[in-house]
Amino acid sequence: MEWYLVPDLVFNGETFIKKVKVGSKSICLVGQGGELFALGAKCPHAGGDLTQGWCNDGKLICPLHRYSFDLKTGKGSAGQNDYVSSYPVEIRGMEVYIGVTSFWEQFKQSFK
């Protein structure tokens, strides 16, 4: 796994939704309830930009068709049968890092 610094962000516990680019990925970074969550930024249903959505009851809501995704796991709500990728987040001192596993690392892990 490779860890990427999120530039120009100091997490102070405030609520926010922001699109960040780490490596080759567009990530929806969410500050909610004093925690940080990192999810894929594109809704798998209709391609909506999840950073334009909002949070409700621990879920990120897509602005296009109101599909919702769990902030911790990325799993879609019941009946959706879809998900967005979720990424680990670490706060190191005053800096925020997002961990991204490459396709090949994920592929190799699937055979263990």
Image (spheres, grey):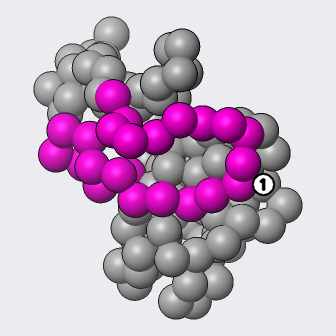
Q: Residue furthest top?
A: 112
Does 88 sit above or below residue 49?
A: above
- The magenta-colored residue range is 5-27
Q: Depth check: give the residue in front, 74 or 22.
A: 22
Task: Name the residue rendered at 71%, 60% in the picture.
Answer: 59
Does 40 sit above or below residue 66?
A: above
Dot 1 falls on a residue whose secondary structure is: loop
Task: Name the residue rendered at 47%, 24% in the picture.
Answer: 95
Mark 1 surroundings within 10 Å by alpha-carbon count, few (fewer than 14), some (14 through 19), many (20 or more): few
Residue under circle 1?
Answer: 58
Q: Depth check: give the residue in front, 17 or 104.
A: 17
* Residue 71 included in the magenta stretch of the image: no
Does 47 sit above or below residue 17?
A: below
* Residue 23 included in the magenta stretch of the image: yes
From the top left corner, tell me how far across and down residue 94 is, in percent: 53, 22
Quadrant of the rendered image containing residue 108: top left
Quadrant of the rendered image containing residue 12: top right
Task: Name the residue rendered at 59%, 51% in the picture.
Answer: 30
From the top left corner, tell me how far across and down residue 40 is, in percent: 41, 54
Task: Name the residue rendered at 16%, 45% in the picture.
Answer: 24
- Could one spot residue 77 in this view of the protein? no
Q: Is residue 55 left or right of residue 22?
A: right
* Residue type highlighted by circle 1: Gly
From the top left corner, tell me how far across and down residue 82 is, in percent: 51, 63
- Could one spot residue 45 in this view of the protein? yes
Q: Residue furthest bottom?
A: 64
